[in-house]
Image (cartoon, helix red, strand yellow):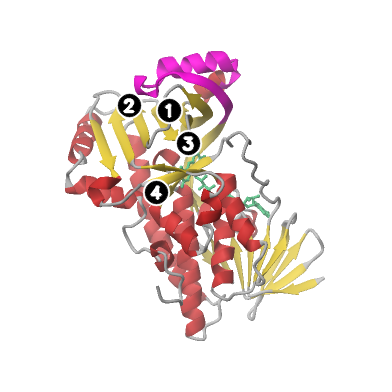
Amino acid sequence: MKRVADVVIVGGGMVGALTAVALAETGFEVALVEHARPKNFEIDQPYDLRVSALSVASVQMLDALSVWPLITAMRACPFRRMAVWDGATGTETHFNSADIGHSQLGFIVENRLIQLGLWQVLETAAQVQLHCPAHIEHFSARRDGIEVVLDTGETIEASLLIAADGANSSVRDLAGIACDGEAYGQHALVASVRTTIDQQDITWQRFLPAGPQAFLPLVGNRASLVWYESAAVIDELKQLPLQELQSRFEEEFPTRLGGLQQIEAVGSFPIRWGQAQRYIDDRLALVGDAAHSVHPLAGQGVNMGMLDASALVQVLVEGRRKGQDAGSQRVLRRYERWRKSENGLVIKALDTTHRIFEPGAAGKRMVRNVALAGAASVSPLNRFLMKVAMGLVGDVPTLAHGVIPGKTS
Ligand SMILES: Cc1cc2nc3c(=O)[nH]c(=O)nc-3n(C[C@H](O)[C@H](O)[C@H](O)COP(=O)(O)OP(=O)(O)OC[C@H]3O[C@@H](n4cnc5c(N)ncnc54)[C@H](O)[C@@H]3O)c2cc1C
C-alpha cells in the first residue's frame, strides 16, 4: 500500500517523537515509523531504570507543545541544586537555580514517560500517521522526493526522511554515513533505589580516577545512582546478589548518599562518544543519537537531540515560508551547519571533562582545581555554567524558549 506524507521519521523515541509533534504542530503531514509503542503508565509501577535529566530548554519545548503537563501528571522530579566535586582533592562546586532567578535547573524523568507524553499527543494528532510496530527496510531518494519501504509492505512517499533511530541508526548505515568516535574504557552501572533520606532536590557527582559516581533524585525517597567504572568492575558488581550490591554502594559512594532501603532495578551501559560525519544526505537529516552520542556525565544526550529536533523544525518552517522544498540541500545544509557545530562543542567539552579526571599527568589535578574553584558558587562562571546546563546558551531554537516556529509568542 502506498501512503503520502511531507516527512517520514524513523524512530519514535524521545527525539523522534518530539520532532513529529513539533512538525505536526507547525502544519506538516508526518509519518512516524517505530518498533514499539511505549508502555502505558500506572501509578504503582516501579521506576524504570532509564531516566534523563531534562534541561529547562527541553522542558520549555515540551511545554510549548502541550506535552509537559501530561508528563508531570505521571511523575517528574525537579532539581534545584547540583554539587560536583573532585574525589582526589575534595574541591567542591555548588550550583543553585535561585542564584540566577530560576525555580529549578531541570527535572529527572523516566525516558519512557517523556516518550509516552509525546505519544499521547501524537495518537490524537490528525496530521500524524503512526506506523507501529514497523521498521524501515530501505529507501531511495529521487530528485522530487524520497520513497521509504517498510517491513509491513507499505511504501511512504515524502519530501524528507528524518533518522531518529538512535545510536545504532540503521537509516544512517543505509545512507552510508560514517561516524567518528570511540568507546571510553568505562561502563555505567545504573541502579534505581530507595534511600533512607527523604525527598531531595539536589543532583551530585563525585569524580574519581576510575570514573564519576552520581546521584539523581526521583519522587519521594527514590533515586537513580550511576557508577562509572571499567567494564570488568561493572561486570563483577552486576554479578553480586542485590543485598551485597547495596552494601557496596553504601561503602563506596559518598556518605551524603545515606543508607539504601532497597535496590529496585539495576543495569549497565557501555559509554562512548560518536558523531556522524554528515548530518544530512539526499532528502535525509539525522537527529538525536543517530547524529551524535556523548558521555552521559553531564546528562546532555537527549537535551542535545531535542535541540536538533527544534532546530530542524525551525529550518523547515522558514524554508516553507520561502517556498523551498523541505528535502532540498539548501534547507538541510542550514540545519547541519547549525547543529553539527553546536554539538561538536558539547562533545569536545564533555570529552575534556572526562579526560581531566582520568589518572595521569600531575598537571590534570591543577587544571581540575582551577576549573572547580573558578566555577565556585557566586562567580560569573558558575552562573554561566548553570545556563549552559539549562540549555539556554548558544544559538538556541525558538521552541527552546517556548515559541513554536512560525507562531508569535
Ligand atoms: C547511562 C546513561 C544515562 C543517560 N542520562 C542522560 C541524561 O540524564 N540526560 C540526557 O539528556 N541524556 C542522557 N543519556 C542519553 C540519552 O539516553 C540519549 O541521548 C537518548 O536516549 C537519545 O534519544 P533518541 O530518541 O535520539 O534515541 P533512542 O532513545 O535510542 O530512540 C530511538 C528509537 O528508535 C527506534 N528504532 C530504532 N531503530 C528503528 C528502526 N529501524 N525502525 C523503527 N524504529 C526504530 C527505537 O525503538 C527507539 O524508540 C543517558 C545515556 C546513558 C547511556
Is residue 61 left or right of 139 when viewed as pictured? Answer: left
First in sequence, mark 3 or 4: give its number.
3
In magenta, the rendered stretch is 238-267
Q: Is 45 in front, or is 263?
A: 45
Give neighbour class at mark 2: few <14, some 14-19, many 20+ (Cα, 10 Å).
few
Up/down of 280 relative to 45, above or below? below
Which amino acid, mark 2?
A: Pro
Between 211 and 198, the residue placed more toward the observer is 198
Q: How many numbered discs, if any?
A: 4
Question: What SS does tag 4 mark?
Answer: helix
> Element type at marker 2?
loop
- Mark 4 C-beta closer than 8 Å to ligand 1: no
* Residue at the disc numbered 2: 359
Residue to which mark 3 is pinned:
218
Name which residue type carries label 1: Asp
- Residue beneath disc 1: 198
Instruction: Determine the CA span between mark 3 and mark 1.
Output: 10 Å
Residue projecting furthest to the bottom: 323
* Residue shown at 31% from the left, 34% from the top: 83
Question: What residue appears at the point 46 percent right and 68 percent down from the top-left corner?
Answer: 335
Residue sitting at 55 percent across and 18 percent down?
236
Residue that carries the numbered disc 4 in the rendered image: 347
Secondary structure beneath disc 3? loop
Q: Disc 2 or disc 4, which is closer to the eye?
A: 4
- Mark whose residue sits in front, 3 or 4: 3
Element marked by disc 1: loop
